[in-house]
């Protein structure tokens, strides 16, 4: 931008209608420190974006809006794919590892020696 000291700069006077000058002063206070910087920033903006103040930005802005929406939809699709293929399976695996319960064991039948009779006696054990 412009240097802080204005000693080395030449100034020029431009005539405006008083209502336009007052409006520009109010606008300039919001945008930059001084009127020269405000005009420079405004001109740079128009030149950089290839916009003319006389043209209606409607079609350009509509096209820009469509492009942004397409990019947003693409980002959403990427995030959904990541969630589906990476995040959810990883979370499920971590939960399975961290919340691992002891597997239920089937009861074992063990022969109990019975001294009174020919039939073996069975009892159930859980290990």
Image: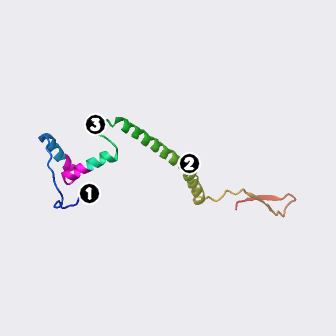
Which label is found at residue 84? Answer: 2
Q: Is residue 24 above or below residue 106?
A: above
The C terminus lies in which quarter of the figure?
A: bottom right
Magenta residues, as a range?
27-40
Q: Is residue 116 above or below residue 56?
A: below
Q: Could you tell which of marks 3 and 2 lies nearer the N-terminus?
A: 3
Residue 114 x %, y %: 82, 62
Residue 35 belongs to magenta span: yes
The N terminus lies in which quarter of the figure?
A: bottom left
Q: Is residue 55 left or right of residue 36?
A: right
Rounded to the nearest angstrom, the CA distance separating label 3 from label 2 is 49 Å
Rounded to the nearest angstrom, the CA distance separating label 1 from label 3 is 26 Å
104 or 91: which is nearer to us? 91
10 or 19: which is nearer to us? 10
Task: Give the class, few, some or many, for how many residues have Cα within 10 Å of label 1's Cα (few <14, many ≥20).
Answer: few
Rounded to the nearest angstrom, the CA distance separating label 2 from label 1 is 49 Å
Q: Are marks 1 and 3 in contact (CB under 8 Å)?
A: no
Q: Mark 3 falls on what kind of element?
A: loop
Residue 34 x %, y %: 19, 53
**Residue positioned 13% across, 40% down in the render:** 17
Where does label 3 land, which residue? Answer: 54
Residue 66 x %, y %: 42, 38
Q: Is residue 64 left or right of residue 9?
A: right
């Amino acid at each position: 931008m412009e240097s802080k000291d204005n000693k080395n700069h030449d100034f020029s006077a431009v005539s405006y209608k008083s209502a336009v000058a007052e409006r520009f002063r109010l606008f300039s206070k919001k945008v930059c420190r001084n009127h020269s910087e405000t005009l420079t920033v405004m001109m740079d903006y128009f030149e950089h974006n290839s916009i003319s103040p006389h043209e209606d930005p409607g079609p350009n802005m509509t096209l820009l809006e469509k492009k942004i929406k397409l990019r947003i939809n693409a980002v959403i699709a990427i995030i959904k794919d990541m969630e589906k293929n990476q995040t959810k399976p990883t979370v499920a695996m971590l939960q399975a590892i961290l919340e691992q319960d002891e597997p239920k064991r089937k009861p074992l039948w063990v022969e109990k020696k019975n001294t009174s009779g020919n039939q073996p006696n069975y009892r159930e054990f859980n290990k």
